[in-house]
């Protein structure tokens, strides 16, 4: 009769098996759209919960089962060394908390790694029968099948969810096509091996688990579906893994004749045809994907290089020759500099590294040591990195040389163990081992170009555990201990079991309760983290909605939920960063200093969590800048210091350089401002704000060619914005290129018909170019828009006068005088037009009335024109009088002295005429009228 403890132990064992099967299926498939970290935190939380639940049940099992013993594995020592170095690296990490739990949206810290290794041991200890083995393998296949079908539906546009990253490359339930492809390429050889072993002859009465032909061919169908979904991911790293893992696996089976030929040929031909089909389609072609990284030659003359900036803080870093072979926008180019930056980090932290999952803190700073943005790059193309896309370098960076050594030791020991036992396996198990080993090799290959995440790393460790389980099962069967024999042996051992003393039982239960309590607290902590992200995402969605609806109430509600997220998980800087951003926006909109104080608190707490947090430095810079600009505090220098620290930690954020450049510009330090704006432009060349700043600074410095270059860039980037054409026209006008200026102003006016400034600038450009027909049209449009401006009428009158259309000139000049009768210029122009029409009396009357109305006007041209009229009417006295008034105002008036000379000559006052004409020649030696009259005076005096 089975006792209660034995019954409990049986249930516990079954529950653990069930949890392991569920973990293999649910971790890859589960995601929660209520989270901000939809695909990452959801999966790692499930990993934690399954691990905790399994550990709880295992703890109870150890308590109630008195004869339980751990299965010895030869690779225990390297695994323990691997764990030990991981723990030490976490302890001495540059950020131990981050190393413990992992960086946000990665979560590959110590906690997750311990869960992976725990599941590895669960697999070894509980997958002890062939039935359990096949159940786990089929669970892996089912999981891959479900995710593949979802991926295929995504590609067909059938998806219940709307993803911001939707595109031709499918990502299924993983959120990233690379991770999805990694799962598929790992499981595919396992499914293929299940298909192949189905055609093996039965071996003894413990024959294979799968003996139904329909079931066997179902694995073929599953493998084809997985293979199709794999092509839809269009992932190069996993394609290399496919070639390096599955191709040798198939080749090895073929040469060893490990399966029947016709199913083998059917599978290989099917895969080959599918590969050809997808490779000829551009959107799924691996060849095209590889070719996309090839560098296209650029004409360097198309780019502007600021040599002054290069000689200062903006210096070119020499690039390795291989970088020139790839396009800057391709991932291969970024990989090169990732690896170089990793080497720089390793130099600083060689032994134990910077700590697991902390690369995001120092990567950008070290990238700046090996990379600088060039203008021909068309911007900083790299995404911000928190992992090195190479397993070896990533391990060396995060856990140092010691960590890399234990990792290599672990993999080597595992390979030696499997290889040493491979020959003793039956053919069926050899195929399974080859399939699992192929999946493991695929993981390792793709990891040299990418990195693992929760579902695929879980799969990696479980597959390693399965390899060991197969060897143990095969060994047990070889010793005559098949499944039935093992069950009989287990019952015999249970009968012989010795009951421990009550003290020992009590101690075990105390330990059990303690462990369960500890796991309960851990579970609550995981739930808090999960709930925090739910609150953050909910608050973020509310804030986005409030921006569209412009609702202050909704903003407060969104802030409430994000604050709850901070309370639930105070170690996550992403939540505090969002709060700071919103608080600063509210401070800017309301001019209320209380919001700045709140932002100050959260920015400070962010730097407490991560002392090198670049966003924290940036927010402090914004806080001090806002205090200076909106509240007149003397905090500009503090703002500059914090922006400089933010740039030190991440030199590739354009906004950091742009804000710092603005502060330098306000302080009058145009050289430093120029450096920062130029760097911001290099990082984000499509941001026209930086182009405008550069244009204005170069205009101030009088460097028209450089100003013109950046103004043209602004037009090129935003050809629909009239202000950039207007700026361009202004530069052309200053460069003495009125025709190009006219063209630019016309374009600005075309894009903004109501642009008064653009029309005025076009008018000035036409005036400068002497294009009177176009100028006349511009002034008439100006008059239509604003008929009360006298200057427009006056200028039209001047143009008509130049065209000798005097009647039209008089009409417009009369309107100008009526609008501004006090303006002497308008009166003078109208009088001149009367003179042109031979209406001297009207001109004289107009001018005399103006002099009487405004006797102190001081505009000499009025007096000169009146003197000229008197001269033509032989009114010598009044002509002399007007000329003398001019000379009183301007002794150097050439016209006044000349008219005086003419008057005195006609009055035969030759001495006075001679004096006036000599004064004229003194002022204008080439004056012909004065010279001719002097010659006549000399002749007359000689006579």
Image (tube, grey):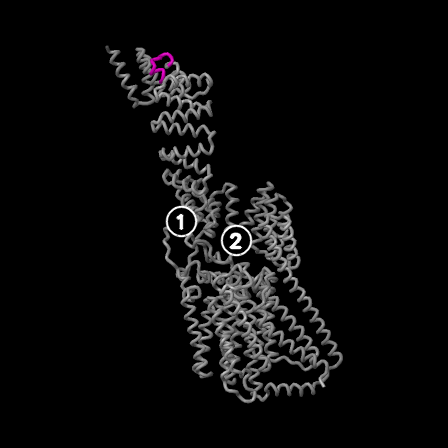
SS for tag 1? loop
Answer whether residue 318 is magenta in the image: no
Q: Nearer the viewer, residue 402 or 645?
A: 645
Q: Quadrant of residue 522?
A: bottom right
Where is residue 559 shown, x and y percent of the image?
63, 52
Image: magenta residue range:
868-878
Horizontal side of residue 772 vs 537, given as left or right: left
Residue at figure coordinates x 37%, y 29% from the top left: 799
Q: Nearer the viewer, residue 924 or 740?
A: 740
The circle on residue 453 is none
Q: Quadrant of residue 526?
A: bottom right
Q: Quadrant of residue 902?
A: top left
Where is residue 367 shown, x and y percent of the image?
49, 58
Looking at marks 1 and 2 on the same chain, the residue that comes earlier in the sequence is marked by 1
Q: Residue furthest right?
A: 502
Mark 1–mark 2 Cα distance, whole angstroms, equals 26 Å
Give the vertical position of 752 relative to 780 (above or below): below
SS for tag 2? helix
Mark 1 surroundings: few (<14), some (14-19) or many (≥20) residues within 10 A: few
Where is residue 132 shown, x and y percent of the image?
59, 80
Tell me if I can see residue 825 in this picture. no
Residue at figure coordinates x 62%, y 60% from the top left: 533
Secondary structure mainly formed by the magenta segment: helix
Q: Quadrant of the C terminus?
A: top left
The circle on residue 304 is 1
Q: Nearer the viewer, residue 529 or 306?
A: 529
Where is residue 112 shown, x and y percent of the image?
59, 68
Tell me the residue that label 2 is attached to.
Answer: 648
């Amino acid at each position: 009769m089975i006792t209660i403890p034995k019954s409990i132990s049986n249930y516990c064992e079954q529950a653990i098996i069930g949890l392991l099967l569920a973990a293999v299926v649910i971790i890859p498939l589960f995601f929660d759209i209520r989270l901000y970290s939809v695909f990452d935190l959801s999966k790692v939380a499930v990993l934690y919960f399954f691990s905790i639940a399994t550990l709880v049940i295992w703890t109870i099992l150890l308590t109630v089962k008195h004869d339980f013993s751990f299965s010895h594995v030869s690779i225990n020592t390297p695994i323990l060394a691997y764990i030990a170095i991981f723990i030490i690296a976490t302890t001495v990490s540059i950020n131990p908390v981050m190393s413990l739990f992992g960086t946000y949206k990665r979560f590959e810290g110590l906690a997750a790694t311990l869960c992976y290794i725990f599941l590895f041991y669960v697999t070894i200890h509980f997958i002890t029968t062939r039935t359990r083995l096949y159940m786990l393998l089929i669970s892996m296949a089912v999981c891959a099948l479900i995710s593949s079908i979802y991926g295929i539906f995504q590609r067909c546009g059938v998806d219940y969810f709307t993803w911001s990253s939707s595109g031709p490359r499918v990502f299924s339930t993983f959120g990233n096509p690379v991770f999805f492809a990694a799962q598929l390429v790992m499981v595919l050889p396992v499914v293929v091996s299940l298909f192949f072993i189905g055609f093996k002859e039965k071996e003894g009465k413990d024959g294979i688990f799968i003996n139904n032909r329909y079931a066997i061919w179902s694995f073929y169908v599953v493998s084809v579906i997985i293979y199709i979904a794999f092509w839809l991911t269009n992932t190069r790293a996993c394609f290399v893994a496919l070639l390096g893992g599955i191709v040798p696996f198939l080749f090895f089976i073929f040469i060893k004749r490990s399966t029947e030929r016709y199913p083998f040929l059917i599978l290989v031909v099917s895969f080959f045809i599918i590969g050809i089909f997808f490779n000829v389609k551009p959107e799924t072609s691996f060849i095209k994907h590889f070719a996309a990284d090839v560098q296209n030659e650029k004409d360097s003359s198309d780019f502007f290089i600021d040599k002054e900036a290069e000689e200062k803080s903006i210096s070119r870093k020499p690039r390795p020759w291989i970088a020139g072979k790839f396009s800057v926008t391709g991932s291969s180019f970024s990989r090169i500099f990732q690896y170089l930056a990793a080497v720089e980090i390793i130099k600083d932290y060689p032994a134990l590294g910077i700590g697991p999952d902390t690369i995001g803190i120092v990567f950008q700073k070290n990238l700046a040591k090996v990379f600088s943005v060039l203008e021909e790059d068309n911007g900083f193309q790299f995404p911000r990195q928190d992992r090195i896309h190479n397993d070896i370098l990533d391990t060396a960076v995060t856990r140092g040389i010691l960590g890399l050594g234990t990792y290599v030791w672990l993999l080597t020991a595992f390979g030696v163990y499997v290889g040493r036992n491979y020959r003793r396996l039956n053919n069926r198990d050899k195929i399974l081992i080859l399939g699992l080993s192929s999946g493991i090799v695929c993981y390792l290959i793709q990891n040299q170009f990418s990195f693992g995440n929760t579902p695929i790393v879980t799969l990696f460790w479980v597959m390693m555990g399965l390899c060991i389980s197969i060897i143990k099962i095969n060994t047990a069967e070889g010793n005559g201990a098949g499944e039935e024999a093992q069950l009989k042996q287990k019952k015999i051992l249970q009968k012989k079991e010795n009951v421990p003393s009550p003290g020992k039982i009590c101690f075990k239960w105390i330990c059990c309760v303690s462990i369960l309590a500890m796991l309960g607290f851990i579970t609550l902590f995981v739930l808090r983290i999960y709930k925090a992200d739910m609150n953050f995402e909910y608050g973020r969605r509310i804030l986005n909605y409030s921006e569209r609806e412009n609702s202050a109430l909704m903003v407060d509600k969104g802030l409430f939920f994000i604050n709850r997220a901070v309370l639930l998980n105070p170690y996550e800087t992403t939540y505090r960063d969002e709060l700071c951003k919103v608080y600063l926006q509210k401070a800017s909109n309301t001019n209320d200093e209380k919001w700045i104080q709140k932002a100050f608190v959260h920015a400070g707490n962010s730097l407490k969590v991560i002392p090198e947090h670049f966003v924290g430095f940036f927010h402090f810079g914004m806080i001090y800048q806002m205090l200076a600009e909106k509240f007149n505090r003397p905090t500009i220098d503090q703002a500059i210091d914090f922006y400089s620290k933010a740039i030190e930690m991440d030199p590739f954020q354009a906004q950091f350089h742009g804000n710092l450049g603005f502060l330098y510009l306000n302080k009058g330090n145009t050289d430093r401002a120029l450096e920062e704006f130029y760097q911001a432009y290099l990082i984000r060349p499509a941001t026209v704000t930086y182009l405008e700043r550069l244009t204005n600074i170069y205009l101030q410095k009088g460097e028209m060619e450089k100003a013109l270059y950046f103004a043209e860039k602004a037009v090129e980037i935003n050809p629909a914005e009239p202000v950039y054409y207007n700026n361009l026209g202004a530069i052309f006008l200053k460069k003495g290129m009125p025709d190009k200026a006219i063209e630019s102003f016309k374009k600005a006016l075309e894009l903004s018909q109501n642009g008064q400034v653009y029309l005025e600038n076009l008018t000035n450009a036409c005036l400068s170019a002497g294009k009177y027909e176009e100028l006349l049209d511009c002034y008439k449009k100006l008059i239509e828009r604003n008929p009360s401006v006298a200057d427009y009428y006056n200028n039209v009158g001047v143009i008509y006068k130049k065209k000798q259309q005097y009647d039209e000139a008089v009409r417009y000049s009369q309107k100008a005088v009526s609008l501004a009768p006090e303006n002497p210029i308008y009166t003078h122009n109208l009088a001149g037009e009367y003179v042109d029409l031979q209406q001297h009396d009207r001109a004289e009357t107009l001018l005399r009335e103006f002099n009487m109305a405004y006797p102190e006007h001081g505009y000499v041209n009025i007096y000169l024109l009146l003197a000229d009229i008197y001269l033509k009417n032989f009114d010598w006295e009044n002509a002399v009088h007007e000329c003398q008034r001019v000379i009183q105002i301007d002794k150097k008036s050439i016209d006044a002295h000349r008219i005086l000379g003419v008057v005195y000559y006609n009055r035969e006052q030759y001495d006075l005429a001679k004096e006036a004409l000599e004064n004229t020649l003194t002022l204008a030696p080439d004056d012909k009228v004065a010279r001719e009259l002097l010659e006549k005076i000399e002749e007359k005096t000689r006579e």
